[in-house]
């Protein structure tokens, strides 16, 4: 068999494109070297690359699983108060709280299909929303419509209070919000804000402890009874025993060596001390992006973008389970520095690849609190 002919084979496929550098075929993810506008396109597929050639009509939707729910903005809210983004919405926006159907694409994305016939319940919910009234015990209003109504009330309260929220953060209380109205929505948002403040306070204390420990490792009088305390007099660090100090210093030296090797391969080592060309910089950035993309893809997440923050850190933006997350990682190792969600100080114990499983557990147990909003 001549594998060169196989690798050079060109195929045609009609696929939904959602933006970014990839598109999902039924059996694999393909790279899109030249991004186009989101929509249905006829792609020319060669190897693992897909080039958009022309807009196309949807194909194969009837074979995909159908999902029903009610519309909240650009999300379909289904039973269980799960609010998933809808891709490729029509130019004409359907009425809010409409009953809609979608098809689930092979990568899990929901593709908008159409609006179903509605009854009195949808009009009842719209009137209550317009008049800023709770639904209370209104009859005939199903679970998905109640949840969509609750999210709409939370959205209005969020604009009024300036407290952002993600649907997965409020899912456990959204039916109470639909029942009680704006007052319950504001209580829910204030509880989220208090949890974020508590987390940020804990994060500041953790950074202070890390800095104090760093001073302890380099102090000439290391091994004395000196104790480092914060502004309120609480102990944050003390000198370490000799063996533990040596182990930590060795770990930090190894981390620095890994990062220096990574950085040098992108600068003087790879480019012999000269200023890299635009193409060489692009390749270096692409290498980092490819590593992050592979790590997230293994976990079922999709990379949206990233940017350098300095000190060997990267800010990574990605979607997972229908939500958008922002995480700060170390470029050399992809170890998490700031997960962007409350992990009770355990951020450094996970990597970009393992973080989505932690997010899934938090979402499934209604315990997710997002601290970095995109």
Image (tube, rainbow, N blue to C red):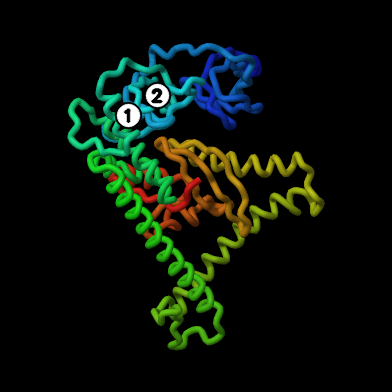
Q: Considering depth in this image, is 293 or 305 the residue closer to the camera?
A: 305
For the residues marked 1 and 2, what is the alpha-carbon distance in whole angstroms?
9 Å
Image quarter in which the N terminus is found? top right
Name which residue lies at 58% across and 51% down. 314
Q: Name the residue under label 2.
A: 95
In the displayed structure image, the side of residue 252 where residue 109 appears, left or right: left
In the displayed structure image, the side of residue 108 where residue 285 appears, left or right: right
Q: Considering depth in this image, is 333 or 77 the residue closer to the camera?
A: 77
Q: Mark 1 points at which residue?
A: 126
Q: Considering depth in this image, is 207 or 354 the residue closer to the camera?
A: 207
Q: Tag 1: Cα neighbours inside 10 Å, few (<14), some, or many (≥20)?
A: some
Specify whether residue 240 is in view: no
Name which residue lies at 50% across and 79% down. 216
Upstream in sequence: badge 1 or badge 2: 2
Relative to 23, residue 300 above or below:
below
Name which residue lies at 24% across and 31% down. 143
Residue 185 x, y percent position in the rendering: 31, 46
Residue 33 x, y percent position in the rendering: 65, 28
């Amino acid at each position: 068999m001549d594998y060169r002919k196989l690798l050079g084979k060109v195929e045609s496929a009609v696929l939904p494109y959602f933006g970014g550098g990839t598109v999902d075929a039924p059996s694999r993810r393909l790279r899109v070297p030249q991004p186009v506008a989101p929509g249905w396109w006829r792609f020319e597929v060669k190897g693992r690359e897909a080039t958009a050639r022309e807009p196309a009509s949807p194909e194969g939707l009837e074979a995909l699983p159908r999902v029903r729910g009610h519309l909240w903005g650009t999300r379909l809210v289904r039973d269980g108060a799960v609010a998933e983004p809808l891709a490729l919405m029509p130019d004409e926006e359907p009425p809010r709280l409409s009953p809609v159907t979608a098809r689930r694409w092979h990568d899990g994305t929901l593709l908008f299909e159409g609006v179903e016939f509605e009854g009195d319940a949808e009009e009842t919910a719209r009137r209550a929303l317009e008049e800023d009234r709770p639904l209370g015990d209104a009859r005939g209003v199903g679970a998905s419509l109640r949840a969509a109504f609750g999210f709409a009330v939370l959205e209005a309260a969020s604009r009024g209070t300036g407290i952002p929220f993600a649907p997965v953060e409020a899912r456990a209380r959204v039916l109470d919000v639909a029942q009680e109205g704006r007052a319950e929505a504001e209580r829910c948002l204030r509880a989220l804000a208090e949890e974020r403040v508590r987390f940020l306070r804990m994060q500041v204390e953790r950074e202070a402890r890390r800095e104090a420990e760093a001073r302890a490792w380099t102090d000439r009088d290391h091994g004395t009874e000196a104790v480092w305390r914060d502004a309120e007099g609480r102990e944050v660090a003390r000198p370490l025993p000799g063996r533990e100090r040596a182990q930590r210093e060795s770990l930090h030296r190894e981390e620095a060596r890994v990062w220096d090797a990574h950085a040098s391969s992108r600068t003087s080592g790879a480019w012999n001390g000269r200023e890299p060309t635009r193409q060489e910089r692009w390749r270096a950035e692409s290498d980092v992006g490819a590593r992050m993309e592979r790590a997230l893809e293994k976990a079922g997440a999709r990379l949206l973008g990233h940017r350098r923050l300095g000190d060997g850190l990267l800010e990574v933006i990605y979607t997972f389970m229908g939500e958008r997350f922002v995480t700060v990682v170390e470029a050399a190792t992809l170890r998490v520095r700031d997960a962007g969600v409350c992990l009770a100080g355990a951020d450094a114990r996970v990597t970009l690849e393992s973080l989505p499983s932690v997010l899934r557990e938090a979402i499934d147990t209604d315990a997710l609190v997002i601290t970095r909003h995109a």
